[in-house]
Image (tube, rainbow, N blue to C red):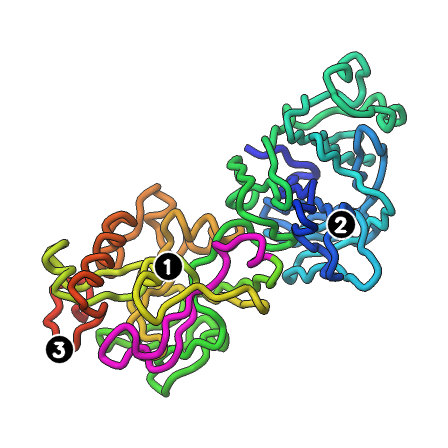
Amino acid sequence: MADAIRGGIVINEVHPNPVTGGGGGFDTDGNGTVSALDEFLEFYNSSSSPIDMSGIELWDPGSGHWFTFPPDSVIEPGGYALVVVGVQAGGSLPPVPPGSLAFDAGRGVAVLNNGGDVIFALDPEDDTYIAAAYGGQPLIDPTDSSTWGGFSGSTAGLSNFPSGATQIGAGEDFGSFLAGQSIKRIPDGSDNFVNNQGASPGRPNGPVICFVAGTLIDTPDGPRPVETFAPGDPVCAADGRTLRVRQVFAREVSAAEQMAAPSLRPVRIGAGTLGSGLPLRDLFVSRQHRMLVQSPVAGRMFGEDTVLVAAVRLTELPGMDICAPLRPVTFVHLAFDRHEIIIAEGAASESLYPGPEALRTLPKPAVNELMRLFPDLARGRRPQPAVLIPSGRRQAKLIMRLLRNKRLPIEQGLPSRGKQLEAS
């Protein structure tokens, strides 16, 4: 369980070395130049209540006390507090979702040590603190100089750390890091750390599984852009039923995030490339979002002609590709009472399926909402998928067979043996 201050604030993401070789890296403030001042820390409210972070101090062994959260720094449940070390001329703080806040520490020099470091968040109201180490540094005690010998950098900044402060938890080791990448929890607030998924300042950690804003979804009153839906709105199921949206989740991913983490770049499924003239126009979805494949090749492999295949697998086929990171992209999830097949740009595709991949992409409040929608999740069981979802390896083999046999993913008029597609 993550160490938390003030009942729920955890250190969620550390970006210690923005610069990569050749002047590349992650430009946090978007001023066009990557520098050491693009370092940032992200905190996450893992509780179910708003938390005021006002007065919490950030400390570093070398720099000492380097930032204090100002008054009214209230973070909503599932929200983020982003601290950028130094926003430079021509730059600005990254946008953050509602209920989150971003701050410029205003430093003129870097704080986080590229050789590894220890981060302390101190609550002076009750003299408690949490600690996180990375890059092989030991979790030293800031109140006991006898523990500082194992730290391989300056500890001069800890001389004024309150001697009576008490640590919450045992401290956390975020592990190693890569230049230009963050070390972060996936999902937010968890005990799982990764260091190769790019930077996502003030944004949910992990990949995304959903439609890109602008995608037209069939409804009884005609197609509507996916971003316009709200809970209770009607949607057409592929089998003719009328569904009601239970929940909508959205996330914007900046061009810089897509550059740093290719897994965040959407897939373009070109108009007509699936077969039978579908989709009706270019369809954009996340890499792991699944499309319906209906083919006798699938029938021979799985005993069912109709299966779901991740969009990234389809990019092996002509007319489908991964988009270049040229602009921000908003991804939108639609959740129903169960996993469903709906119509996007005329083509059959899935609604949100709350499997492990999807749950890693959503903040805690969204996961809690899904637990209410899908009781099996709370019992540790996977919900029943609307249609067979083969393993990733088997999906790849299916696409290779389609290529070899010069078949398209959708063949018109094929009798479906996918039982879950029948009206119920």
| Mark drawn on residue 312 | 1
Seen at 69% across and 48% down, the residue is 51
Please name which of the two marks, 1 or 3, marks the residue nearer to the observer. 1
Using the rendered view, name the quadrant where residue 165 is placed: top right
**Does residue 272 lie above or below 25 as drawn?**
below
**x and y percent of residue 160 in the render?**
89, 27
Q: Is residue 210 magenta?
A: no
Residue shown at 37% from the left, 81% from the top: 281
- Identified by mark 2, the residue type is Ser
Numbered label tally: 3
Q: Earlier in the sequence, mark 1 or mark 3?
A: 1
Q: 276 and 215: which one is in front?
A: 276
Q: CB atoms at circles 1 and 3 under 8 Å apart?
A: no
Q: Which kind of residue does numbered mark 1 sit on?
A: Val
Q: Nearer the viewer, residue 187 or 302?
A: 302
Secondary structure under tag 3 reads loop
